[in-house]
Image (cartoon, rainbow, N blue to C red):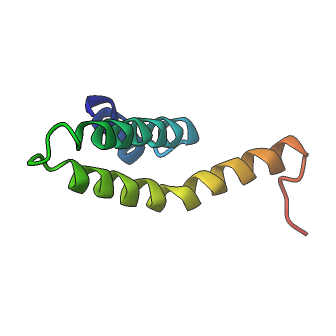
């Protein structure tokens, strides 16, 4: 969870594709932890954490897609639009 916080700070500061990728990976790990601990600690707020991480990750999908497309376009030498 600490890695997710650190990655989120890097995304806010720099916004580059590596930081976005790292944040998405950290959020997936948080979601896995929340789903694993929810049955063991039913009074905990694991479901809310899972939902919050899911919403944040979903919001980053379009940004990550744009980074991947930009990288692929640059590698094909298509940096200018007609």
Q: Is residue 82 left or right of residue 35?
A: right
Q: Which residue lies furthest to the left in this view?
A: 43
Q: Which residue lies furthest to the bottom in this view?
A: 82
Q: Position of residue 80 (x, y in %)?
A: 85, 59
Q: Position of residue 44 (x, y in %)?
A: 11, 46
Q: Position of residue 42 (x, y in %)?
A: 14, 47
Residue at image x 85%, y 41%?
A: 75
Q: Residue furthest top?
A: 3
Q: Which residue lies furthest to the front in this view?
A: 39
In this rendering, the answer to whether 12 lies above or below 7 is below
Image quadrant where residue 10 sits: top left
Residue at image x 64%, y 55%?
A: 65
In this rendering, the answer to whether 45 lies above or below 33 is below
Q: In this view, does 68 lie to the left or right of 24?
A: right
Q: Which of 42 and 26 is in front in this view?
A: 42
The number of discs equals 0
Q: Which of 39 and 18 is in front in this view?
A: 39
Residue at image x 24%, y 54%?
A: 47
Q: In this view, does 37 lie to the left or right of 68?
A: left
Residue at image x 23%, y 42%?
A: 39
Q: Which of 55 and 10 is in front in this view?
A: 55
Q: In this view, does 26 lie to the left or right of 38?
A: right
Q: Position of residue 52 (x, y in %)?
A: 29, 56
Split into 4 quadrants, where in the image is the N terminus? top left
Split into 4 quadrants, where in the image is the C terminus? bottom right
């Amino acid at each position: 969870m600490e890695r997710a916080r650190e990655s989120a700070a890097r995304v806010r500061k720099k916004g580059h594709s590596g930081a976005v990728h790292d944040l998405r990976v950290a959020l997936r790990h948080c979601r896995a932890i929340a789903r694993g601990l929810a049955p063991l600690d039913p009074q905990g707020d694991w479901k809310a954490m899972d939902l919050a991480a899911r919403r944040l990750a979903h919001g980053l999908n379009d940004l990550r897609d744009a980074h991947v497309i930009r990288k692929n376009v640059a590698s094909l030498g298509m940096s200018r639009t007609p």
